[in-house]
Each structure stands twice: as structure tokens, then as C-alpha cells.
Image (cartoon, rainbow, N blue to C red):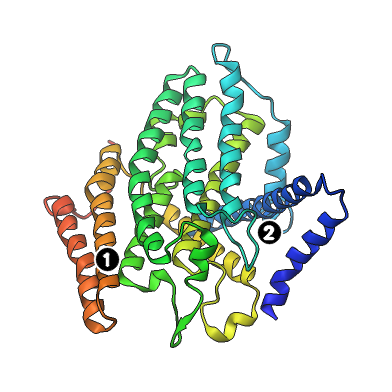
């Protein structure tokens, strides 16, 4: 039944494409896929904004949006109208062309990365043999757009925010990619569809997801942390540190251009979460065998909303890091841990299934974690925080 429901969208798309002349069919097929991706994730973007503001409000003991619509649910619509009607202010000294192109260069690549993320059975816009490589190659354009925004604004705060962002993205991109390598090694393919298919199955009652192995769990956590830094989310939101550089690289943007930056960051977060689900959480696969009657896209978006909830929770809980802490964490902890995760995956592949394999692989991940933690934080003494008022 679930497979039949998953096929409805595919059959409807094929029937619609067949109505067009043969010359137009490839273009129409691509247009339908693009429209479906934009509509689905733009709707998720609006939903996430209200959920995040409500969630942060509860964490901080306040109400959050509650005026526009019932329970404030129409607040994203009001924000969209406000962004469209606000005046577009551009600094006189700014590079007009680059200032205009920067938000577009950010939004277009992040939507393109979603084209290789399978959201259900046979529900992927483009099934590339090198889908993972395409994801990271196209996603790298966001670094260019951030630098374009900071440089073209002719503002020192914007340029400082852009340089922070580029340094952060490059630093965390290395452990991010290294965390993906064990999955590619075991799947034997760079195709996101093949990677999901390799995880469809059950060992007893436990699904064969990569996250349910010692190396996979470690790589999954590393991927989420590095992905959070790539998306400039708290506690890694130094490029837009309001207390230091006002608003970072998009301080000179207003109106719809600012909304595009806002949209691009959230869509990038969805894309990174979608790839994490594809690589480590079985993609559209069900967590239990009896639940396979539920369509795959329901499981995919359920997992996606769960990860978004985790990101909201982290944002409302952890304070922002300093720049030196951010870089030290990337190069002295994340990078070595990603390499040890690869070694653990190699040991998992070489050893015979059984308890010794689990023990060795857990030790290969947990041992470096403890040693690196003591190396980085062992000399630091954290006392009880004291609150004092100014005289």
C-alpha cells in the first residue's frame, strides 16, 4: 500500500508530461520537479519560522508570535508581505551588481542541492550516480555568495562578518565531508538513492540504518555539528553576531533581499538535514517493519521535522562560541574525530559480526573522544556562574 501511495506522484507527473509535445517533455518534467521542490520546502520554511519562534518563546518563558491569525499562525504570511513591501535600501558606495546578485547566488544553489535528496520511494528530482558529490559541489557556492554580500556592501562590519563566515564554512566543511566517507565506503556508491536502498532492511527489530553502528553514530553526530556550523546556526552563528558586528554580512540588506538570505539559510538547513537523513537515518525508510505500510515521504518529513526540532532546542539552549573556540573545535576535535570514525568503519568492515566487533569499534570512537576532550578542555576550570549588577 505504501509503495502504491509513493507511486501516485510519479504516475501523475508522467501523465502530465505525456500531454505535452515530445520536444517540450524534458523541460516540462524538470519544471514540475522544480515547482514541487520549491512549493514543499517553501511551505516547510514558513512552518519552521513559526515553530521556531514559538519554541524559543517557550524556552525563554514568553509567548512568541500570537497576534496575527489564530495563535499567531499567520505571522509568516505577515512577515512575507512586510518583506515584499519594505523599501530596498542600497548603500551609495556599494557594488550595485554584486549587491543584487549575492542573495540569488545563495538561494539558487541550496534549492539545487535538494534535487538529489530522495524524499520517498522513486521521489527524487534527479538520480545522479554522483549525487553526494553534486550536493557538496553545488552547495559550495554559498561561500561565494556570503563573500559577495560582505564585499559589495562596502561596510567594514559586513566584510568582517563575511570573512568570519568563509573561515567557518571552510573549516567545518572538511569534517563534514570526512563524516560522509564511511557511508560512501559501505554503500559503494555516491548515489543518494543507492545509499538509502542500502539501509532498507531490518536486523531483527532494529533497522539497518548507518546511525545504529558505532562508526555511523559518531559520523552522524559529527555531520550534524558540522552542518549546524555550515548553516550558521547557533551556537555557531558568529558571522551574524549581533552583539559584536550588528548583523554580519547582510547588515546592508533590507526588504526582499534580506528575506532571500533568511530563506537561503533555512533551505540550506533543510538540505543538510535531508542529506543527514539520507546518509544515516535510512532516508524514507520506516523505523519498524510493521510501519512500512506508511508512505516513505511521511517518514522522511517526520524525520526532517524531528531534526529541525533538535536545531531549535540547541539554539534556545547553548550560548554562542567565541571565534577562537569555534576554530579550535573544528581543527583540534572535529577533524581528528572524523578520521577516527573512518578507522572505526574500516575495523567494522574487516571484523566478523559479533560482540568483539562492537567493543573494538566503540573503543575506537569513544577513546579518542575522551582523550581529545581532556586535551582541549582538561586544563580549563569552569566555576559556578555568578551574576553581579553594576554599581
Image quarter hosting the N terminus: bottom right
Q: Mark number for residue 71?
A: 2
Asked whether residue 97 appears in the rendered view, the answer is yes
Q: Residues within 10 Å of mark 1 (few under 14, many from 20)?
A: some
State the mark number for residue 346: 1
Direction top: furthest residue: 93
Q: Position of residue 133 (x, y in %)?
A: 47, 49
Q: Position of residue 332 (x, y in %)?
A: 22, 47
Any mark on residue 237, and which? none
Location of the C terminus (image quadrant): top left
> Where in the figure is residue 355, as x and y percent of width and height?
24, 83
Q: Quadrant of residue 351?
A: bottom left
Looking at the picture, how far across and down is residue 2, in whole percent?
A: 67, 78
Is 107 in front, or is 236? 107
Residue 63 visible in the shown view: no
Residue at coordinates 21% horizontally, 61% vertically from top-left? 369
Amino acid at each position: 500500500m505504501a509503495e502504491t501511495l509513493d507511486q501516485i506522484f510519479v504516475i501523475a507527473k508522467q501523465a502530465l508530461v505525456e500531454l505535452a509535445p515530445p520536444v517540450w517533455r524534458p523541460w516540462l518534467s524538470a519544471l514540475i520537479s522544480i515547482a514541487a521542490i520549491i512549493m514543499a520546502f517553501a511551505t516547510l520554511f514558513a512552518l519552521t519560522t513559526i515553530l521556531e519562534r514559538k519554541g524559543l518563546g517557550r524556552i525563554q518563558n514568553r509567548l512568541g508570535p500570537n497576534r496575527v491569525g489564530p495563535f499567531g499562525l499567520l505571522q509568516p504570511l505577515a512577515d512575507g508581505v512586510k518583506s515584499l513591501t519594505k523599501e530596498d535600501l542600497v548603500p551609495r558606495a556599494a557594488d550595485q551588481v554584486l549587491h543584487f546578485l549575492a542573495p540569488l547566488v545563495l538561494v539558487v544553489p541550496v534549492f539545487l542541492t535538494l534535487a538529489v535528496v530522495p524524499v520517498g520511494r522513486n521521489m527524487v528530482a534527479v538520480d545522479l550516480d554522483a549525487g553526494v558529490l553534486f550536493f557538496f559541489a553545488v552547495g559550495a557556492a554559498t561561500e561565494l555568495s556570503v563573500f559577495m554580500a560582505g564585499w559589495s556592501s562596502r561596510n567594514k562590519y559586513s566584510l568582517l562578518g563575511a570573512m568570519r563566515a568563509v573561515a567557518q564554512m571552510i573549516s567545518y566543511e572538511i569534517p563534514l565531508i570526512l563524516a560522509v566517507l564511511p557511508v560512501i565506503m559501505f554503500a559503494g556508491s555516491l548515489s543518494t538513492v543507492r545509499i538509502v536502498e542500502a539501509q532498507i532492511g531490518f536486523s531483527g527489530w532494529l533497522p539497518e540504518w548507518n546511525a545504529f553502528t558505532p562508526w555511523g553514530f559518531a559520523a552522524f553526530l559529527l555531520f550534524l555539528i558540522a552542518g549546524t556550523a555550515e548553516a550558521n546556526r547557533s551556537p555557531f552563528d558568529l558571522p551574524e553576531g549581533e552583539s559584536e558586528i550588528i548583523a554580519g554580512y547582510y547588515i546592508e540588506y533590507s526588504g526582499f533581499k534580506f528575506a532571500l538570505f533568511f530563506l537561503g539559510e533555512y533551505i540550506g538547513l533543510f538540505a543538510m538535514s535531508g542529506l543527514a537523513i539520507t546518509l544515516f537515518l535510512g532516508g524514507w525508510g520506516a523505523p519498524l517493519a510493521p510501519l512500512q505500510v506508511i508512505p516513505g515521504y511521511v517518514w522522511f518529513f517526520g524525520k526532517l521535522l524531528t531534526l529541525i526540532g533538535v536545531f531549535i532546542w540547541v539554539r534556545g539552549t547553548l550560548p554562542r562560541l567565541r571565534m577562537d573556540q569555534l576554530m579550535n573545535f573544528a581543527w583540534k576535535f572535529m577533524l581528528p574525530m572524523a578520521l577516527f570514525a573512518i578507522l572505526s568503519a574500516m575495523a567494522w568492515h574487516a571484523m566478523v559480526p559479533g560482540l568483539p566487533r562492537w567493543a573494538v569499534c566503540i573503543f575506537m570512537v569513544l577513546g579518542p573522544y575522551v582523550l581529545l576532550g581532556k586535551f582541549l578542555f582538561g586544563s580549563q576550570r569552569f566555576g559556578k556562574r555568578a551574576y553581579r549588577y553594576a554599581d
